Image (cartoon, grey):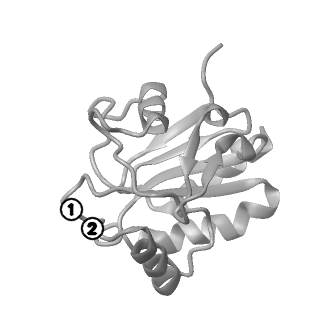
Amino acid sequence: MTATLHDFTATAIDGTETDLSAYEGQVVLVVNTASDCGFTSQYAGLQELHDSFTEHGFSVLGFPCNQFGGQEPGDEAEIASFCDRSFGVTFPMFAKVDVNGDDAHPLFDWLKQEKSGLLGAAIKWNFTKFLVGRDGRVVKRFSPTAEPASLADQIEEALAA
């Protein structure tokens, strides 16, 4: 049996362990985020997607990452405060993770294995996005430059599937 999103756990930004099977039956957008990145303003668009589709069974899951230019230097409390204060983020945020290398979170190893990017499997920058269907399988991978609003049609398709 091949793995799905629902087979993983992750530490929430408040330190509690979260079983991602809690998202079974939902469409999820997994994003590696950063507070001091050229794409940080995408938090606003991610929140808009979350607000627009949450009642239809959709959630954004944010995973802060400091592997790209040291753009997420803060601890979890600082990250949570920044996201709330700057963008009113209400979607689930998780503890800081590595997305590449020997210490990469197993979820990101799996996501990269499921959908390689244009330049190979490695994640190239913050705000890489993975759309996961209700069945827990990766539907599509989006580059950091993909504006959240541009994903709405594909999220709707995944919700309808």
Identify the mark at residue 134; answer none if there is no mark: none
130 horizontally vs 67: left or right = right
Which residue occupies the extreme top position in the image? 1
Residues at circles 1 and 2 in contact by the CB criterion of under 8 Å: yes
62 horizontally vs 19: left or right = left
Tell me if I can see residue 154 in this picture. Answer: no
Image coordinates of residue 21 in percent, x first then y, are 71, 40
Q: Give, as a three-letter code, the residue at label 2.
A: Pro
Location of residue 103 by image quarter? top left
Q: Give, as a three-letter code, the residue at label 1.
A: Gly
Q: Looking at the image, is 79 positioned above or below residue 81?
A: above
Label 1: state its secondary structure: loop
At horizontal 61% and vertical 17% (from top left) the residue drawn is 2
Crowd band around label 2 with a 10 angstrom C-alpha radius: few (<14), some (14–19), many (20+): some
At horizontal 36% and vertical 35% (from top left) the residue drawn is 117
Label 2: state its secondary structure: loop
Disc 2: which residue: 73
Task: Out of 150 and 131, give the one closest to the viewer.
Answer: 131
Image coordinates of residue 20 in percent, x first then y, are 65, 43
Disc 1: which residue: 70
Tell me if I can see residue 92 in this picture. Answer: yes
